Amino acid sequence: MQPFAFNTKYDQSILLGRKAKNLQTLLAGVRAVPESSLYFHTHRFLLQHHFLSPEPPNDFAYWATEVLNDDPLGEKLSSVDILQYASLEDLRTFFITVLDESLQHADRLPDCPRGEEFHFMACRTFVLPTPYAADNLEAFSLILEHISISALYYHIFDARLRLGRGDNDFSRWFADLGHEELAAKMRMLDPYTQTLEGLRSHIITMVRDYDAH
């Protein structure tokens, strides 16, 4: 069986040159931007503020609330349960639906203050190998104690949505080893409701408890 090779990553933020000044242009942007932009605006807080739990709202919700002063819309946008979506296109559909419904019921479309437009961004990700590889669960849990937060993030979040795998890398490897029960437990974890350090500790405990039996 192939050992689990741990990778890490480096993200370079990219300004797409598209911005929104009101609800209508925000909706147009969400329809048009690449998937990498949707990922950026719904996940960047997770890595930048990995010590916070629950995580701050996505960028769309934050802008609607804090800049457009549209609390109902901000609440709807922040209610998204990202774990329910298997692809970024499904996630795009959620935001389009919420924004379109709000647009249909809007009495007016106020522009944001000058200089506070929503700037659509994306990121270019560089994946780097680490010197760590595990060929069994014990080695996996030991290595997981020491890898960087960026490596953990890559194998949990990037693998499932940005890479379009529909599953995190750890669950896939557990299943390949024949540990279907452990793989299922890993899939059931909601990584969006805890800090990344908390997630690390949870996974290590789960793997070691499973391996002990």
Image (cartoon, grey):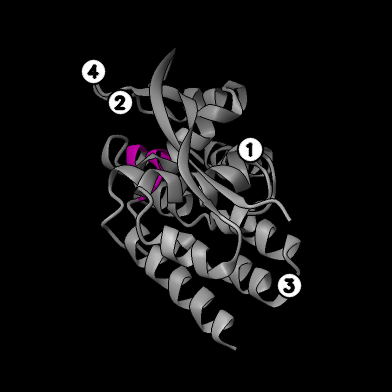
Secondary structure under tag 1 reads: loop
Above-or-below relation of 57 to 113 = below
- Find the magenta span and give its range: 57-63
Per the image, the residue denoted by label 3 is 180
Q: In the rendered structure, which disc, 2 or 1, sits on the residue that comes first in sequence?
A: 2
Q: Residue 156, image x and y in percent? A: 53, 52
Determine if residue 94 is in view: no
Callout 2–callout 1 Cβ contact below 8 Å: no
Above-or-below relation of 16 to 171 = above
The CA distance from mark 2 to mark 1 is 34 Å
The CA distance from mark 2 to mark 4 is 8 Å
Q: In the rendered structure, which disc, 4 or 3, sits on the residue that comes first in sequence?
A: 4
* Amino acid on which the number 4 mark rests in the picture: Gly
The CA distance from mark 4 to mark 3 is 52 Å
| Mark 3: few/some/many CA within 10 Å (<14, 14-19, 20+) | some
Per the image, the residue denoted by label 1 is 163
Q: Which residue is drawn at the image coordinates 50% and 26% (left, top)?
A: 24
The CA distance from mark 4 to mark 1 is 34 Å
